[in-house]
Image (cartoon, rainbow, N blue to C red):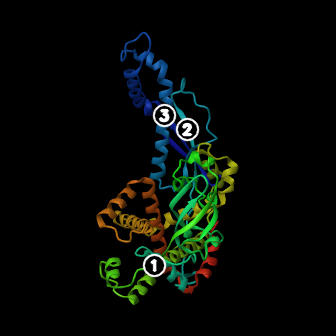
Amino acid sequence: MNIVRENLDDLTSLLKVTVGEADYNEAVDKTLRQYKKKANIPGFRPGMVPMGVINKMYRRGAVAEEAYKMASNACFDYLEKEKINYIGDLLPSDRQQPLDFENNTEHEFVFEFGVSPEVKIELGAKDKLTRYTIEVSKEMRDGYRKSFLGKFGRLVDVEKVEGEEALTVTLDSEAMKVEEAYVGLVSMSEEERKPFLGKKVGDQMDVNINELYKNPAQRAAILHVKEDELAGIAPEFKLTVTKIRKFAEPELNEEFFKMAFPEGNVKGEKELDAWFDAQISKDLARESDYLFLLEMRDMLVKKANLTLPEAFLKRWLYTINEGKFTMEDIEKDFAGFVEMMKWNIIQKHYIQTLELNVTKEEALEEAKSLTRMQFAQYGMGTVADDMLANYANSILENKEESRKIYEKLYERKVVDALTPMVKVSEKSVSVEEFGKLAEKYRG
């Protein structure tokens, strides 16, 4: 087997691989013996078909398959041995000449690959970045407090509707009467709540049931009918308020703190306010870190000034997507893809030169962190360690999810390793100011 590399002018290279009979004969014979065992040909018992017949019927296809496989594998071995960095994947070249597997014993396969550019970046004090810290505002504290205490609150009876109460009502029409129906004002818009404001127990109002309960499934459940029966029900009802309840925050006493913080780390209101600020700051720090990462990425991409084999990459994207996208589709998002590819090349460069590594333990901790956030979204602030570990391991067993976690950790390690090499200043900004700074990365 012989491999020759030829560099082209468009940042791509060809690999011409010549595969001879001595290279593929053993593999072809093995394949044909397998065919012989399974062949079901009229006139012959299974497994008893003569090899001459098998050769005549299948050898040409077996040679084509095995020779191509050997040529392809040889190319990857060559790239690894020669330590050649390439982009995308190997593709059969447009310069491939027709192959005659019937009469020839030597076959030349031609593959093409995009050459990855060399990364040369010098970093120093002249390279300046700003890490923006988001200030904790009163609105943030109030919102976080309301959300947190809502997990421990209760509904209490009140005299009249003021905004976000939960109503128990009776719905009455000529055809039917529904008692103990629920109307949740918290899920309504400000405009939708207006007719209810100021209402007291015993007050009545005319409502359109289709507007009051927009979801057909919910409407059917309220009226105790099947969804397909809704069309025959007139939507006009008389609504009578029978109960008005409002959410009340829990009393911040010893019982509450023991229930909310069983580990005993928060025992009073001052400590609770400090805990709120700490939790909010953690969330805001993630946003700050991510913006800093984007700023670092942009600076490095600009300084590297890489040139990529764009024509090859477009053809590669079209090929690997197997016709799911047209070339016009690929063209639309290609600029963003190129920027991502440049960043990936820069990351790979630093991962290799700085010998960065992500351990299984680090990946597991990241998976646990993601799991904690998912549970927190469902109101589960505290999760048993064994349950957390089980969920985290299941995430890592998913190849796609595991890949995302490792990529995220490697990206973070690259940024962390390069941060001391540049001059970083700190600046505190409001959430509005931060939003404007992050705007250029949206969309």
> How far apart are the alpha carbons under marks 1 and 2?
75 Å
Element type where label 3 sits in the image:
helix
- Is residue 203 toward the left or the right of residue 26 in the image? right
Q: Earlier in the sequence, mark 2 or mark 3?
A: 3
Q: As displayed, is residue 239 above or below residue 250?
A: above
Picture coordinates of residue 159, whole percent (x, y)? 52, 78
| Residue on which disc 3 sits | 67
Quadrant in which the C terminus is drawn:
bottom right
- Callout 2 environment at 10 Å: few (<14), some (14 to 19), or many (20+)? many
The amino acid type, in three-letter code, at marker 1 is: Ala
Residue at left 63%, top 51%?
312
Residue at left 37%, top 13%?
45
Residue at left 37%, top 16%?
46
| Residue on which disc 1 sits | 248
Element type where label 1 sits in the image:
strand
| Residue on which disc 2 sits | 109
> How far apart are the alpha carbons under marks 2 and 3?
9 Å
Q: Are marks 1 and 2 in contact (CB under 8 Å)?
A: no
Viewer-nearest of discs 3 and 1: 1
Residue at left 59%, top 64%?
239
Dividing the picture into quadrants, the one containing residue 154 is bottom left
The amino acid type, in three-letter code, at marker 3 is: Ala
> How far apart are the alpha carbons under marks 3 and 1?
76 Å
Q: Residue furthest front?
A: 174
Q: Earlier in the sequence, mark 3 or mark 1?
A: 3
- Is residue 223 toward the left or the right of residue 264 in the image? right
Q: As displayed, is residue 131 above or below residue 61?
A: below
The amino acid type, in three-letter code, at marker 2 is: Phe
